[in-house]
Image: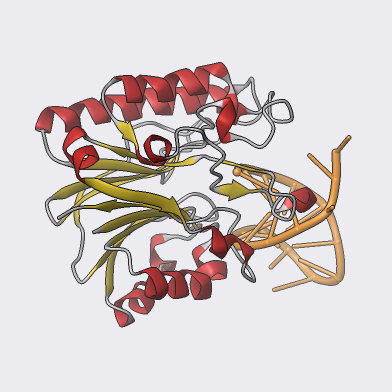
Amino acid sequence: MRIATFNINGIKARLPRLLEWLEETRPTVACLQEIKTMDEGFPAEEFEKIGYHAIWHGQKSFNGVAILADGEKPKEIQRGLGIDGPRDGEGEQARYLEAEVKGLRICNLYLPNGNPHPGPKFDYKLAWMEKLRARMHDIWAEEVPAVVLGDFNVIPEDKDVWSPKAMASDALMQPESRDAYKRMLADGWTDAIDTLNPRGGVWTYWDYQAGAWQRDRGFRIDHLLLSPELADRMTAAGVDKEYRGREKSSDHTPVWVEIRD
DNA sequence: ATGTCAACCTAAGGTTGA
């Protein structure tokens, strides 16, 4: 089965691209980030028409995550990590949705960007990463096959960015962000793309600005972390790069892992 | 600061977030 993550940057603006990607690549599970709509604006019936059932966690204008599954409705386990946003009184942002599909635990996340660094948004990012790690510990203790995937907004190493120098001051590659990510790997989770592409040079995001796509100035921030059992069952992992070059594309590409049944 | 984009507030154009 194929499990995929795709930061779509607005589900209303991206619906035609999203539907065509689902039909062309037919992932078993598709985790979406930045749906940028309230719950009532989620086009569930469009996905039903092509055989996908969904659960979603929306928010007005920003953020928002969804889990789609081919032929069955994901069984929701948890929404949110229990952490408020960086502004006073705003409550929790829609960044985390966890479900069970075909006996697998699917943890879909949209990690805070954290720019500008330093500042309250960066502090929020680090706090969010610690909350996530704590949740990953709980899941580990349950001993269920699990994949933690989504837009982590972390460039793990210099080999994962077109120019470490150009990005040096960005929150995505600060040592604190990288250390927090490394701790998850040290806990025993396997970075699917990195494991199969140890030399790096794989991008999942190209900025809309400054001709980044045309110049291949991208980086890798969309990740799939596998529990040990699933890491053993991994047969392939990749990036659907072609979709970044289509009309009205997201600034991210879909990223996926293939798991042996 | 930026060769950009999406959504929102509000009524064509600015603000926010990425």
Q: Is residue A193 left or right of residue A51?
A: right
Percent across and percent down for residue A82 are 32, 33
Q: Position of residue A166 (x, y in %)?
A: 74, 30
Q: Quadrant of residue A6?
A: bottom left
In percent of width and height, residue A186 lies at 32, 19
State which quadrant residue A83 falls in. Answer: top left
* Residue at (61% x, 35% y) in the render: A161
- Relative to B16, is A61 above or below? below
Residue at the far bottom in the pictured view: A49
Q: Nearer the viewer, residue A200 or A244?
A: A200
In the displayed structure, does residue A85 sit left or right of residue A25? right
Can residue A43 be seen?
A: no
Residue A215: percent from the left, percent from the top?
74, 50
Give the camera-side residue of B10 and A58.
A58
Marks counted in the figure total: 0
Q: Is residue A25 visible?
A: yes
Rendered residue at 41%/67% (across/down): A42
Which of the two residues, A258 or A109, is positioned nearer the viewer here? A258
The color scheme shown is secondary structure
Residue A50, placed above or below residue A221: below
Q: Quadrant of the C terminus of chain A?
A: bottom left
Q: Look at the picture and state if A124 lies above or below A221.
A: above
Q: Which residue appears at 69% of the width and 30% of the height?
A: A167
Q: Quadrant of the N terminus of chain A?
A: bottom left
Left or right: A116 in relation to A149: right
Compared to A121, does B16 lie above or below? Answer: below
